[in-house]
Amino acid sequence: MKQIVILGAGFGGLSAAKLLAKKLKNAGLNDKYKITLVDRNDYHTYTPMLYEAATTAKETANYIELRNIATFPMSVALKNSGINFIKNEIVKINIADGVVQLRNETLTCDYLVLALGSETNFFGIPGLEERALTLKTFIDALRLRDTILNAIAENQNARIIIGGGGSTGVELAGEIKMWMPQTRVSIIEASESVLFGFAPKVVRKAEKRLMCLGIEIITSERITSIDEKKVKLASGKDVAYNVFVWGGGTKASKLISELPLKIEEGKRGRVEVAEEMECLVRTPDLTLRSKIYATGDNVCSKAPSVARAAIDHAKIASSNIIADILNEEGRGKFGHKIYKSYDYPYIIPVGGKYAIVKIGPFVISGFFGWIIKGIVELNYLLSILPFWRALKVWLKGIKIFIQNDRLG
């Protein structure tokens, strides 16, 4: 059987696997092609839920309840799909020979999809990686929650500093303040405003909401180092903290940088791709055994790093892989689809039942934005889980976070 290997079970990887499985089944080629999905975890993480998991009181939800609404077992997400799932660490990728080396196992692939997600980018700032908390995984969310609770147990007026005023920083700051109103929450951002690069109307609404919540916004200040008690800024100021969270940037997986592919200039390390989402090699004379595609945060794209973009990447990549397969099988002459970036809608929650939604030229904020956020979450859950399970998870999440707002 020919092998289609997908590395990473995030938004892009899981979508690509399920789409390919469906297309192969419709083409009657299940007996000729095998889809293998690899991830270090045996669950899919719904990352937009992490900031809420990190700020939910233990009285409201325990570890298991939070895990059940923020992560979903691959055995459920892939049930009856025919997809082979492997929980393992990826050690090395040899694209010339079409080989993926796992711990104690080797995979050979005819088609490869890179969906490895991103890693936290510490930009070489002294002390940052050693002392900052991050919010990339469910375990990160629990660690952050426990650290905040311990800090407040020692000091009711503990100061929480969030480095980076992007969407992660804004969402987390608002929710922490709603959860623990007695704390002093500050955002430090190197740009001239939070949510730099977002629509001006969205930025204005976010800043107004943050200020209404009592969150301090420090802009045009770059962090140069951090020690156990204070953050040092480029202006020479020192800012004391009890808890420091870093949300100042991401970069592609380290495994990507080791590949002989074209990598964007700068510190994010993402792969340059053709319009078909096929990865570009560094030198034209490099011969590859397999075709290589990429999705999500692995892709150098002008589109924002949102789930919708990763899913769209997966749609294009899976369609083109199937086109190649059908051509090889003599089923006709199928052309490739082209990825076209556009102004993706996005949602930025800013504490409690308040969210800012941008859809095209329209910006909706407040409670109605929060309602739209809930509908989007339900829609995604329905795409990866059985109907009744998706509905149960969604309702449970709504109940937990409403209770948490009241407790806060």
Image: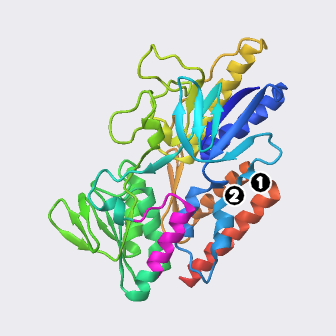
Stretch in magenta: 133-149
Is disc 2 in contact with disc 1, using a CB cutoff of under 8 Å? yes
Q: Could you say where residue 174 lies in the image, as x and y percent from the top left?
A: 45, 69
Q: Which residue is mark 1?
A: 76
Q: Within 10 Å of the Cα at label 1, are there few (<14), some (14-19), or many (20+) other Cα atoms?
A: some
- Quadrant the N terminus occupies: top right
Gap in angstroms between the C-alphas marked 2 and 1:
7 Å
Q: Nearer the viewer, residue 169 or 356?
A: 169
Residue located farthest toward the left when viewing the structure as drawn: 236
The residue type indicated by label 2 comes to Phe
125 displayed left or right of 330: left
Q: Is residue 65 above or below residue 355?
A: below
Q: Is residue 315 above or below residue 334?
A: below
Let me know if residue 138 is in the magenta part.
yes
Q: Could you say where residue 237 lies in the image, as x and y percent from the top left?
A: 17, 68
Q: Nearer the viewer, residue 355 or 84?
A: 84
Residue at the spot x=45%, y=50% of the render? 119
SS at badge 2: strand
Q: Is residue 331 above or below residue 102?
A: above
- Judging from the image, the colouring scheme is rainbow
The residue type indicated by label 1 comes to Val
Let me know if residue 398 is in the magenta part.
no
Q: Could you say where residue 375 lies in the image, as x and y percent from the top left?
A: 66, 57
SS at badge 1: helix
Residue at the spot x=77%, y=15% of the render? 329
272 displayed left or right of 216: right
Q: Which mark is residue 403?
A: none
Residue at the spot x=41%, y=62% of the render? 169
Q: Which residue is mark 2?
A: 72
Q: Quadrant of residue 156?
A: bottom left
Q: Is residue 156 above or below residue 64?
A: below
